[in-house]
């Protein structure tokens, strides 16, 4: 095990999935994340060529036996998805590789157990594989910036969509609203869709007083955006304001959407503007009207 990687710092599935997604994004800028509530067709991450499905499974006291059980359960689900007449079958069309990524170790005698599972997957036209802790550390060693981001003990500058939503659910004003379907604001959602497709527009401001639902709207649109081949990052505004190297946490070759919810610092906005001049960057910034004028000066 690597000395600079302490797996005890990863304590929940949300953070683990974020880590796995970051590792894949840095190697496959076209990968797609399935992290919105509701149907995900058994897919956490889909490779850019739509041939490989990754499933991130974090378990306390994990073991190879548990992973084998999960793999068998997921295979039964995959069979159902592939026989579906709609969304699920479309997601699995063309997929020929399935990888379970989890926090477990493998003993030499475990390979025989996996061979039987692999055979069952092959009968469905899918190659089954796994990433255990050893494989994850091998991948992390390729990207020291990711290792530092998740294992340095410092607050991270950017959260994934699911991490941002999980963090907001701990706040009283969002705990209930995030658990129910989002209704309305269809015109605003259409504006966001157009913004995401635009080759010219790099910044979308969301202006409104506090308490009108800007943050809830941001969560809705980023969940939608994450289904596209784009790197979606939710800024930890306080940490980002104090950081001088936050740009290192972003894959420069990936299309990137940064969400900044009510920043206090004009200088931070200007620094973001410097980077989004690049073709692959966009930003959505939620502001109160009183904060609008200074950063336009």
Image (cartoon, grey):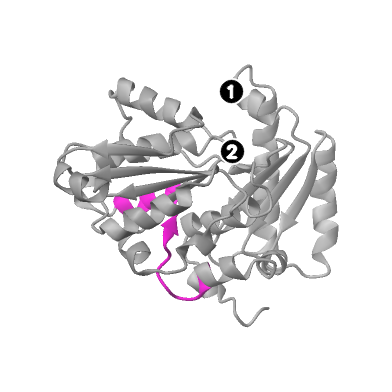
Residues tagged 2 and 1 counted as in contact (Cβ below 8 A): no
Q: In the picture provided, is 97 more to the left or to the right than 63? A: right
Q: Nearer the viewer, residue 115 or 213?
A: 213
**Residue 229's mark?**
2
Q: Residues within 10 Å of mark 2 (few under 14, many from 20)?
A: many
**Relative image position of residue 182 (x, y in whole percent):** 31, 29
Mark 2 and mark 1 lie on one chain; the one further toward the N terminus is 1
Q: Nearer the viewer, mark 2 or mark 1?
A: 2
Q: Is residue 164 magenta?
A: yes
Q: Quadrant of residue 263?
A: bottom left
For image coordinates 43% across by 30% down, the residue present is 195
Q: Is residue 142 visible?
A: yes
**Relative image position of residue 290 (x, y in whole percent):** 14, 46
Q: In the picture provided, is 265 more to the left or to the right than 25? A: left
**Relative image position of residue 172 (x, y in whole percent):** 20, 50
Residue situated furthest top in the rendering: 85
Q: Nearer the viewer, residue 21 or 193?
A: 193
What residue span does the magenta drawing correspond to? Answer: 150-169
Q: In the picture provided, is 275 more to the left or to the right than 287? A: right
């Amino acid at each position: 095990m690597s000395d600079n990687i302490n797996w005890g710092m990863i304590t929940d599935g949300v953070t683990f999935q974020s880590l796995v997604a970051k590792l894949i994004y840095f190697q496959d800028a076209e990968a797609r994340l399935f992290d919105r509530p509701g149907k995900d067709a058994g897919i956490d991450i889909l490779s850019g060529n739509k041939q490989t499905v990754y499933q991130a499974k974090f378990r306390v006291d994990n073991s190879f036996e548990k992973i084998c059980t999960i793999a068998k359960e997921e295979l039964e689900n995959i069979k159902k998805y592939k026989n579906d007449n709609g969304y699920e079958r479309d997601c699995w069309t063309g997929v020929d590789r399935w990888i379970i990524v989890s926090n477990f170790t493998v003993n030499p005698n475990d390979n025989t157990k996996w061979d039987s599972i692999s055979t069952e997957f092959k009968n469905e036209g899918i190659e089954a594989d796994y990433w255990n802790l050893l494989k994850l550390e091998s991948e992390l060693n390729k990207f020291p910036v990711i290792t530092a981001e998740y294992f340095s003990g410092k607050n991270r500058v950017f959260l994934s969509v699911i991490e941002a939503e999980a963090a907001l659910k701990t706040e009283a004003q969002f705990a209930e609203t995030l658990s129910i379907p989002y209704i309305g604001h269809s015109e605003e959602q259409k504006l966001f869709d157009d913004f995401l497709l635009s080759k010219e527009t790099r910044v979308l401001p969301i202006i409104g007083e506090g308490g009108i639902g800007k943050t809830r709207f941001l969560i809705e649109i980023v969940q939608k955006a994450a289904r596209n081949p784009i790197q979606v990052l939710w800024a930890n505004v306080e940490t980002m304001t104090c950081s001088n190297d936050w740009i290192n946490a972003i894959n420069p070759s990936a299309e990137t959407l940064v969400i900044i919810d009510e920043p206090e610092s004009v200088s931070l906005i200007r620094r973001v503007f410097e980077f989004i001049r690049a073709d692959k960057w966009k930003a959505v910034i939620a502001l109160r009207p009183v904060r609008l004028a200074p950063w336009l000066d």
